[in-house]
Image: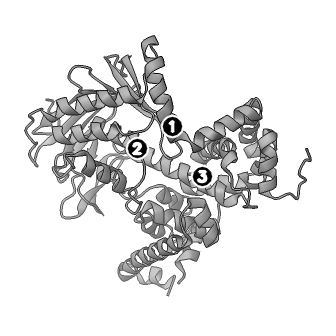
Amino acid sequence: MDEIQLIRSMVAETELPKSDDLSPVRERLIAAARAETGPAVARRRGRRFTLVGAVGIAAAIAAVVVLAPFGGPAPSAEAAGVLRRAADVVRGLQEAAPRADQFVYTKTEHPDGVREAWQSVDGTRDGMVQNDPSEEPAWLPGCRDGKAQATKGGRPVPGRFTDCTPEPAYRPDMPTDVAAMLVFLNRNGLDDLDRSSANDRPVNGEDVAYLLRENYLSPRSRAALFEALALVPDLTLEQDERDAAGRRGVKISWPDTDDHGGGDLILDLETYTVLGSEDTAVLARGVVDQVGQRP
Amino acid sequence: MSSPGEDADDATVIEASLRDPERFAVIFDRHGPHICRYLERRLGRQVADDLVAETFLTALAKRWQYDLSRPDARPWLYGIATNLVSRHWRAEARELKLRDRVPGEEPEAGHAERVAEQVTAQAMGKLLATALAGLAVAERDVLLLIAWEGLAYDEVAAALDIPVGTVRSRLNRARRKVQRTLRTADDIATPEEANHHG
């Protein structure tokens, strides 16, 4: 048995696309090529890619002095400062850790609607997610003894189980200082997607934002995430922005890079509570005893 | 300014495209279909159409950094495409966790699973997909560039910007893991299925 050949046979039937099918893509490419107004512009663009770190820092320092008083996004130093203050404030909060048998409740607004979710604190209890009030809620089967009830369309399939590892909604073992958090972010990424990668990649702002928005973390872990986010290159700060639900806050943004997508996080300027981002809003978050309960 | 002919290698075309950006269309004509098929195999047709455009727009913007000592641009393009696959996949894992994919429903299955569904005629398809889904991203990238796309070790190394030794070790690890999954399945498979690779 040669597993390489077996793996090849999986896709043996995928045909090469016809050139007609690709002509819209070709048109886009040519349009982009034409949009380069000349070699000088193109060369500058190339240089920006290779020297992004150095240029970024220099531009940031220059722009702090020159741009900030005139409005518009303020660059890295100031954004990082806000995040470090947020870390200091959040670190001092007293919050009781949820019990293993409880559920983390989140209500979030997304471009597609409002979602309510009840996720098991230790990942072993059955939770629920309601993506749309008009639809039936979907069941989130808990993972017990390495097995979870199989579901189809959000409903249990009797007698069928899938292998699993529990996905706790609250992880008591999450790092609580920035150094350990950076190791966690680089090595684990999310869901161990990148287990074998080297621990030398820049912080992915979207991973941090996701953890801050959609998870329930101890105040010290949240503080560590704010500090990790402060290390993302080329952050910008905008003082008076609104999240997806229209609530006012301070917006921290990071640009698209080769490795990571750009994104933003909007914080309440006084409490540094995570409100959401331009297209999402965390409307409510808390710990409850039962599925269906709201804090 | 001489214009490279049809038989000029990729490096020559890319060099010419630094002055004349539209020349870059030649690179697309040569490699676009294969990159598109690779993206389709990994993520399905719909996403492939978007990402093939993104691959070549990224390549156009980054062509200034292209190593002109490499006549064949294929590994470079596969590298850009693979990077976009993992970016797409990370974003999707983040966003779909609760929204479109209900956890517990084939929890470890991903794009490879979807590929398997497209080739239901293959008895091994689902099992292989499960095996692929169990690999680390870096291992899967190496394995699929070799098995699906037929890249050589040094081409994979160039594409992913890793040493050839790392390509070898990731491939070996990936193969061992796949073998283990298939063997485990053998033990519990019906005799008929077991005969497929007896």
Q: Is residue A20 visible?
A: yes
SS under mark 2:
loop
Q: Chain of mark 3?
A: B
Total numbered circles: 3
Q: What residue is drawn where x is 29% and y is 35%?
A: A213
Q: Which residue is mark 1?
A: A256
SS under mark 1:
loop
Q: Nearer the viewer, residue B194 or A73?
A: A73
The amino acid at mark 2 is Asn
How many residues crowd mark 3 within 10 Å: few (<14), some (14–19), many (20+)?
many
Q: What residue is drawn where x is 16% and y is 46%?
A: A121
- Say if mark 1 contacts mark 3, CB within 8 Å: no
Mark 3 to mark 2 CA distance (whole Å): 19 Å
Question: Is residue B81 shown left or right of residue B104?
Answer: right
Q: Are marks 3 and 2 on the same chain?
A: no
Q: Chain of mark 1?
A: A
Q: Nearer the viewer, mark 3 or mark 2?
A: 2
Q: What residue is drawn where x is 24% and y is 28%?
A: A85
Q: Chain of mark 2?
A: A
Disc number placed over residue A204 in the picture, else none: 2
Question: Is residue B83 shown left or right of residue A189?
Answer: right
